[in-house]
Amino acid sequence: MYSEKAMYAPLESYFHSRGFQTFREVPLLTRRIDLLGVNHSGITAVELKVKNWQKALQQALSYRLCANKVYVAVSEEFVHRVDTELFGHYGIGILSVDGEVHPVLEASDSQVIHSSLLATVLKYTEKDTSKRAGR
Amino acid sequence: MRVYYRLGTAGEKKIFENYPTKYYGIAVGANLAAFYPDWLPTFLRAVRKPFFIDPVTHVFARSLENIKKDSEVKKSFHKLAKAYSHKLVDLIEKDGRQLIPKDFLSNRRWNTKFMEELAKNVIDFQMEIMQAPSQPSLLEYAEILGEKIPEEVKGPEFLVAPYFYSPSCHDPWYGISLEAAKQAISFKGSLPLFAVICTSRELLLNKVDIKQVAKDYDEFDGYILWISEFDEKQEGEEYLTGLIDMVKELAMGKKPVYTLYGEYFSTMISKFGLSGYCRGICYGASKSVDAAGGGGARLPQLYYIELNHGKLSETIARTFFTDNPGELCKCEVCSNVIKHTHESDPTKKVAGFFDKMDFESTRAHFLVVHARELEELPVAQLKDIVKQLEASAQKCHDLKAQFYNVSDDHLHRWRSVLAKRI
């Protein structure tokens, strides 16, 4: 069984290969987005959960306020338990992780972005990028 | 139904002053009163609301770590200990320990000297609270200008006897707390004296103990119940039922019964004799006797939601209302904020609303909405309250509220407990 921590590396590789710059633990008000990818097409947010997809959905719903696309990444072992219809209803995508990343459900474009939250998240990524460049 | 909001810090002054019609009275911790001997009477005179002082004597019988900061007893508690008893100061300073049952005994009998000293000083502290010198208040300026002056607040609405936490009637602290409270009766003068019954959740499950408490405390003019760590939203049905049993038993004496920490469930059980309750403004609806005392913690910014009578973090509130914009509150505070967003698109309206909703507005919204709940509930019949809870739970289900972390579990438990009493 995959631990949440072990899910980061394959997910980061997956997003890097698609031209995304990635950031871990990005603050969003009272929460933290597990993984955030930024590229020319916009922001993608990912909530990592080994098996508790209901909890993941709660978090992912908030990410829609600041990201163009939102995914929940679940361990391959438990992905069959996820209610794909419900995720589809909210436009949340599903990624299955087993050392590699397999898209199960494509995310829709978020229609509920709060511009102030988007700006805050972008500001964080810019600051983090400058910090990395200065290292 | 009376609600007394607890004054948590001096910084809360404005919210109390700006919404005086939205609450009945103010509860003030004696540690805060000890720390602000000049400011507090000025504030209480200006706000002109009934108030009482919670003597918080229990803290001196719990671990002193609860009232320490940087290894020192916080100034406010040190001042309070000094006001209450020299022996207490010696114990804290020289012996570095809290009160223990032995301190209240002398030759296997009550140490009446210490008990009397403590009881007298606890009562005097409350009686003298308005006597501290204060700067000229707005009222005094008004008087100079020849304006009509309303009757001044002269002192607390009622006195509160010293109290200590005892988990059951068989704990040594039960007898000590009762005796210390009884000692206070002779010092109360013409003011009503309330006893605090500060106990555990477990006592609520014991009907014999509940009857015993009511019998032992029958000499007092009113009761304040503090069930340590009792959280109305988390409790199982047996504990909620126990609270109703306790309130009913105490209310049989036709004296006021309050809870020191409570929320919507407390409002509903006015049907069983609860006269009122205390809490912080949109925080502090439950408290452990071992919670760190003396404030200093930053108050959380939480948004009150009528749907489940709960509080949401900004993240959850934004998410929930973005998907359910029709559920946005229409109270006077929220309507005013919404008006200033100048947005017609529902998502932009919700986003703009929370961008503008600052800490003070969030708390004002709570005061306004809860004041309305407090007006409506006591006049409603129990069967209608149960129906209302059913409707709220159904709405939560229809809106898939659980996926937003907007829980409805407590609504089902409250409904079940109250339905059995119809």
Image (spheres, rainbow, N blue to C red):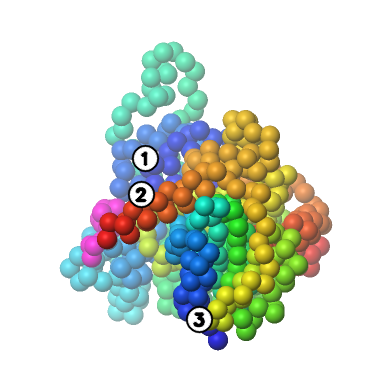
- Residue B385 belongs to the span the image colors magenta: no
Can you identify the residue that label 1 sits on? B40
Residue nearest the viewer, comparing B63 with B299: B299
Give the vertical position of B85 relative to B337 (above or below): below
Give the amino acid type for the residue marked by disc 1 in the picture: Leu
Give the amino acid type for the residue marked by disc 3 in the picture: Ser
- The residues tagged by marks 2 and 3 sit, at their Cα atoms, a distance apart of 48 Å
Q: Residue furthest top?
A: B146
Determine the residue positioned at 76% across, 67% down. A85
Please indicate, yes or no, whether residue A11 appears anywhere in the rendered image.
yes
Which x, y percent locates residue B122? 36, 54
- The residues tagged by marks 3 and 1 sit, at their Cα atoms, a distance apart of 54 Å
Give the amino acid type for the residue marked by disc 2 in the picture: Leu
- Which element type, helix, strand or loop, lies under badge 2? helix
Can you identify the residue that label 2 sits on? B32
Sequence-wise, which precedes: disc 2 or disc 1? 2
Which x, y percent locates residue B369? 64, 43
Chain identity of mark 3: A
Front disc: 2 or 3: 3
Instruction: Confirm or deny contact between disc 2 and disc 1 (CB under 8 A).
Output: yes
Front disc: 3 or 1: 3
Quick one: quadrant of the C terminus of chain B? Answer: bottom right
- Which element type, helix, strand or loop, lies under badge 1? helix
Chain identity of mark 2: B
Give the number of callouts: 3
Magenta-drawn segment: B70-84
Crowding near the residue tagged with mark 2, few <14, some 14–19, many ≥20 C-alpha atoms within 10 Å:
many
Crowding near the residue tagged with mark 3, few <14, some 14–19, many ≥20 C-alpha atoms within 10 Å:
few
- The residues tagged by marks 2 and 1 sit, at their Cα atoms, a distance apart of 8 Å
Chain identity of mark 1: B
Give the vertical position of B84 relative to B25 (above or below): below
Can you identify the residue that label 3 sits on? A3
